[in-house]
Amino acid sequence: MRKVCELGRSMVEMLGVLAIIGVLSVGGIAGYSKAMEKYKLNKQATQLTHLANVMHIYKNQWEILGQNSEFVNLIPYYKSMGEIDDEMIKDESEYIYDSFGSKIKMSTNGCIAPNPCTGTVLHLYVAEDTSFSVCQNFFQIGKEFDEQLSYMGAYKSVDGQGSGYRFYGSKRCNSQVTCIKDTTLIDMEQACRFCEQNASMCTLVYSYSF
């Protein structure tokens, strides 16, 4: 009888140990996923900070590029100048990719022939699986470039009609618009919720004026 009881107790203990291992495994996976996302967010912040600086430093060099085209892709130029990290180049397309695999495009903007372009723009294209944190990260980095940016924002375009959020840099800031320097976490959250609801059509933007 004693052996039967001991055997039963041993089985219960073993099941308890297995249950604990299972919980620890789930916790370990969750912890790893959280740490990996934090690593990617830090990496993305470094990437966006560099690209935002590059866009600002060279922006005036591209003014005449778009006289015969509405948009000119600037990525080939930046690649040849050694300004694009090899990790961000996945293919020969017009895009580069951040640490989350989100597409990024950099081009001239507001070019209407025969007039010169009015500026340059960086687009980060939101995918269905883009996390809310990626959007928040984008705006947090952009806020550090208040003096350089014309505006930053989130928008969607359907059949030529656009809508979304814009936060304006110090040079365009006035009482009629929301300024980057005054942007709160709530403002950024609203813009990111807008993107979350329109994921397949939403684009995050840094815009620069000449």
Image (cartoon, helix red, strand yellow):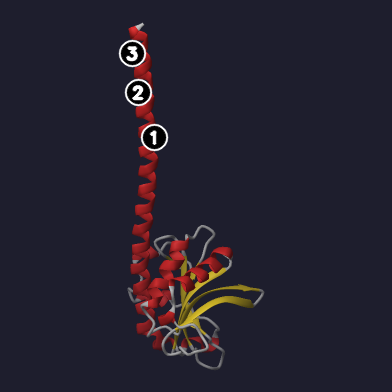
For this rendering, which residue is in front, 8 or 110?
8
Which kind of residue does numbered mark 2 sit on? Glu
In the rendering, which numbered label is found on residue 22?
A: 1
Cα distance between the residues tagged 2 and 3: 10 Å
In the rendering, which numbered label is found on residue 13?
A: 2
For this rendering, which residue is in front, 79 or 34?
34
Around disc 3, counting alpha carbons within 10 Å, would you say few (fewer than 14), some (14 to 19), or many (20 or more)?
A: few
- Identity of the residue drawn at 41% across and 67% down: 137
For this rendering, which residue is in front, 56 or 130?
130
- Identity of the residue drawn at 33% across and 8% down: 2
For this rendering, which residue is in front, 204 or 164?
164
Spot occupied by residue 41 in the image (x, y as percentages of width and height): 37, 62
Which kind of residue does numbered mark 1 sit on? Gly
Badges 1 and 2: C-beta atoms under 8 Å apart? Answer: no
Establish if 166 lies above or below 174: above
| Residue 200 visible from this viewpoint | no
In the rendering, which numbered label is found on residue 6?
A: 3
Q: Mark 3 vs mark 1: which is more N-terminal?
A: 3
- Identity of the residue drawn at 38% across and 21% down: 12
Q: Quadrant of residue 7?
A: top left
In the rendering, which numbered label is found on residue 171?
A: none
Around disc 2, counting alpha carbons within 10 Å, would you say few (fewer than 14), some (14 to 19), or many (20 or more)?
A: few
Which kind of residue does numbered mark 3 sit on? Glu
| Residue 44 visible from this viewpoint | yes
The image quadrant where one finds the C terminus is bottom left
Establish if 8 lies above or below 171: above
Q: Mark 2 vs mark 3: which is more N-terminal?
A: 3
Q: Mark 1 vs mark 2: which is more N-terminal?
A: 2
Establish if 134 lies above or below 32: below
Mark 1, secondary structure of its residue: helix
Spot occupied by residue 86 in the image (x, y as percentages of width and height): 35, 65
